[in-house]
Amino acid sequence: MHHLTPRRNLAPKHLQRPARALCALMAVAALSACSGWGSRMPGITSLVTPYKIDIVQGNVVTREQAQALKVGMSRAQVRDVLGSPLLASVFHSDRWDYVFTFRRQGQEPQQRKLAVFFKGETLERFEGDELPSESEFVASLDTRRKFGKVPPLQATEAQLKSFQDKNAGAPTAPTPPTAAPDTTYPPLESPGAAR
């Protein structure tokens, strides 16, 4: 049976201490170089920024949804139009708050609020910020991609004719024969089964 023995340091004792001191000195120099890098070259550090995800919180309420609200609606009808409220306080049971925030790196955060007030089980009034239309809200979400002019999605008669001429000589794939569907089905119950 073989016993494993720890490996001995092959460097002579008089070289080990200076080697450790040199490693420690190099580590300190490397760390101090990192701290001064941004002050000497601010252009490079401003180009490299960490990725931050878009943060969407709350209920999106659009102008069209707010216009669908009518005084006298029931709580269930309001919930059908706006969705469940973000804030429904136990102490203020006649008030629902719809709050929406959207944070994206490099842009001002968006925040909108809508408060709905009930009297008993019916809608009494509602108030809030200026709400965007649905198309304005969607456009505000996708600000990074800018598309050019959308090309027309119709072909002219000349384009259709040239397409037909190009494909006239192309071989067509044979169509597989279709089998007639089987119209006989097995019985649902086996004969002699008890009911």
Image (cartoon, rainbow, N blue to C red):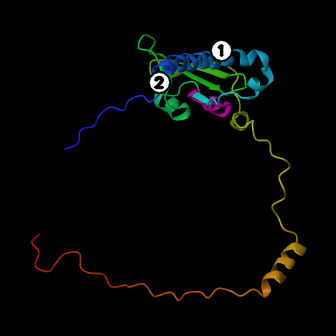
| Between 190 and 54, the one nearer to me in the picture | 54
Magenta stretch in the rendered image: 57-70
Residue 44 vertical position relative to residue 172 in the rendered view, above or below: above
Q: Say what secondary structure mark 2 lies in.
A: loop
Q: Which residue is under mark 2? A: 12
Residue 154 in sight in this render: yes
- Give the residue displayed 75% in from the left and 37% down from the top: 144
Crowd around label 2: few <14 · some 14–19 · many ≥20 (10 Å): few
- Give the residue displayed 68% in from the left and 86% down from the top: 172
Residue 69 magenta-highlighted: yes
Would residue 39 appear left or right of 118 to someone viewing this image? right
Q: Earlier in the sequence, mark 2 or mark 1?
A: 2
Quarter holding residue 57: top right
Q: Quadrant of the C terminus?
A: bottom left
Residue 127 in sight in this render: no
Q: Which residue is under mark 1? A: 32
Residue farthest to the top, as pictured: 91
| Between 4 and 73, the one nearer to me in the picture | 4
